[in-house]
Image (tube, grey):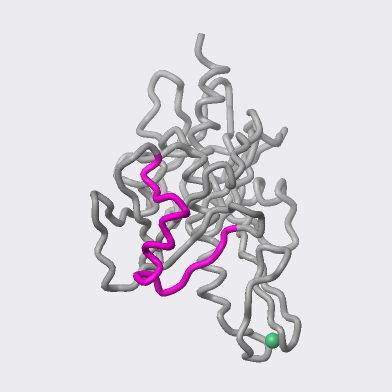
Amino acid sequence: MSSATSDKPNANPKLFIFDNSPEGRILIGPGETGVPDAAELGRLADSMSAQGRVSRSSGCDLWAIAKTDFQPQDGYFFAQRRELPEMCEESMFRRSGAAFQMKTLYVKNKFCGECGNVMSDHEADPARVCGACGNVVYPALSSAVIVAVEKDGMLLLGHNVNFPNTRYSVLAGFVEPGETLEDAVNREVYEESEVRVKNITYFGSQPWPFPNSMMFGFRADWESGEPRPDGVELTDVRWFAPRDLPDIPPPISISRRLIDDWMSRNTR
Ligand SMILES: [Zn+2]
């Protein structure tokens, strides 16, 4: 898998406007990217309750939170962030995720959790800092593993309780403190499917800002066990052949890339 495409945010800085909802719906509209240019903030500043920079570099993307009475105009509307992967190109999706996570960092760290003093943006890092006690808070990043388990040309896919009706995907889960990524792959696959794996190899990674996951993708080979769903996270898990794949995640996701990679090696 190729490394992430480089898109210097300062090439064409954008303004990512979120509403007040916890999931942070995002303002999009007409135009090539559907996202306002950063220069728009000057005109819209009075309609925003907070604003900030996504990075410390010059000409960087900006984030802002719309006041509750803000009325989008000119074809703009608030969309669910989860719909974004199917509405814009990947680089814009990734930039919007960075903006959302910096917005969240601000919202959760207006005041210091150590001493209660007002916090401000860190001068050099994407972080918040307390001028009174020196406490520095960085954006939360929750590590998760996602793994394509293969056996004799078949792929292990599960149906998660949170997926749309007929959606299946490769298995995934959060890394726990003290675990290596490989430990997490072994544990998650076994917990969710009772399958043991071997030959774990790194595939690639993807930030997944719902709300703050960092996905580490792996391939692995089946070692033992018959797939059986845990009944909690997964209601079904089984082997699929290339010719009878079910409904799978959209192309922008690393889960889909893992599936496509397996397909490319198992179809002639
Ligand atoms: Zn403090």
Ligand 1, seen in the image, is in the quarter at: bottom right
Which span of residues is magenta-colored?
A: 33-54
Locate residue 70, reporting x and y percent. Answer: 28, 68
User: Do we see residue 189 in this rendering?
Assistant: no
Report the residue at 69% width, 82% height from top.
130
Establish if 197 lies above or below 209. above
Position of 151 with respect to 77 (left or right) is right
Establish if 112 lies above or below 229. below
Position of 245 with respect to 100 (left or right) is left
From the image, which quarter does the N terminus lie in? top right
| 229 inside magenta stretch | no
Locate residue 134, reporting x and y percent. Answer: 75, 82
Establish if 1 lies above or below 43. above
Report the residue at 63% width, 41% height from top.
205
User: Nearest the camera: 154 or 165?
Assistant: 165
Report the residue at 37% width, 72% height from top.
46
User: Nearest the camera: 40 or 149?
Assistant: 40
